[in-house]
Amino acid sequence: MNRTCRTVLTTVLAMALVAGTATTPAQATAEKTGGVGPTSIALPDGFQPEGIATAGRYAYLGSRATGAIYRADLVTGAGRLLSPATGTPSLGLAVDHRARLFVAGGAAGDARVVDTRTGRVLASYRFADAPTFVNDVILTEQAAYFTDSYRPVLYRLPLSGRGKLPPPDGFTTIPLTGDFAQVDTGINLNGIVRTPDRTGLLVVQSNTGILFRVDPATGATRTVDVPGHTFTNGDGLLLVGRTLYVVQNRLNQIAVVRLRPDGTAGQLTGLITDPHFDVPTTVAAAFGRLYLPNARFTTPPTESTSYTVVAVRPR
């Protein structure tokens, strides 16, 4: 699933030394190595993370169980609850330059926008009634685009250059045509990013492992040709330059793809694995690292189940 604006990879160590707002430990633990900060950050027990977005020294994570939003300091490993439980999921996340967090609402069929400074909900949007599963979001200069895993559509939320959010009914539904086909009732559309040339969108279909390019104006889709690899269990996507990172959650790996600028084709250049992966779902970048929340789908969730965010080096 996905999660940015998933921020562009940066190696500026000075950012890590900037004094930030004090945070409480909130069960965060740090396995410090020689990098900017922890390579493993503990989340509150029972949190059930799904999406992640980063901005500066902070990561924002959503709970698929309660809808709560947690803010973790990537430098210290400390964190705190930013936005309380809503009773509906918080899945894919993206943060903009106005410190607003866009949140995909899963089976609630909705999305909301949260102020990352106060945790206040600035706006809410109801896209669809059941069956629906609003899974991920990507931001462009003109709009926020959301995927729905149970429907062959994208939801477009227009964004004003002056920062004004649209009214509750101010979104459009874009039906997908072309190569994409909805399959059965499982998780279909999942992660979403822009193409390297910023003219289109890329989405992954989890249950088929196929990557598609989408024309955001028309909804027309075409299969992205990546010879020799299928993105089965594809979840969160992250684009850095022309490199696409595809999280394959239950395979505990990230596929690394070098794309054409228009996103119509690419070549697999490697796989990233880590012994600390435990069904990671989404990915965001900061301080020259990739950060992934372990959703632990294969572990029965309880109030005391532990969850972590794992940092790995990109390729």
Image (cartoon, grey):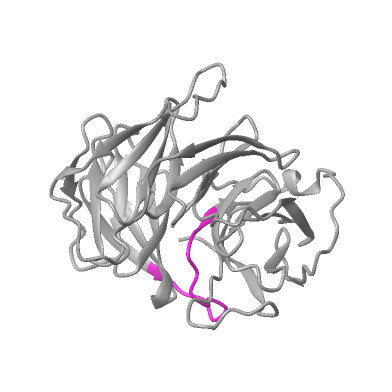
User: Which is nearer the eye, 187 or 292?
Assistant: 187
Horizontal relation, residue 130 to residue 220: left or right:
right
Q: Magenta-highlighted stretch: main secondary structure?
A: loop
Quarter holding residue 268 = bottom left
**x and y, in percent, of residue 187 in the image:** 32, 63
Considering only vertical position in the picture, is 294 above or below 157?
A: below
| Residue 111 visible somewhere in the drawing | yes
Q: Looking at the rendering, in which quadrant would you find the N terminus?
A: bottom left
Residue furthest to the top in view is 162
**x and y, in percent, of residue 243 in the image:** 38, 51
Which residue is painted at 64% across and 51% down in the image? 60
Which residue is painted at 71% across and 42% down in the image? 119
Which residue is painted at 20% across and 52% down in the image? 224
User: Which is nearer the eye, 236 or 299?
Assistant: 299
Magenta-tinted stretch: 271-284
| 79 drawn magenta | no
Considering only vertical position in the picture, is 49 above or below 106?
A: below
**x and y, in percent, of residue 166 in the image:** 49, 24
Residue furthest to the left in view is 178
| Residue 312 visible somewhere in the drawing | no
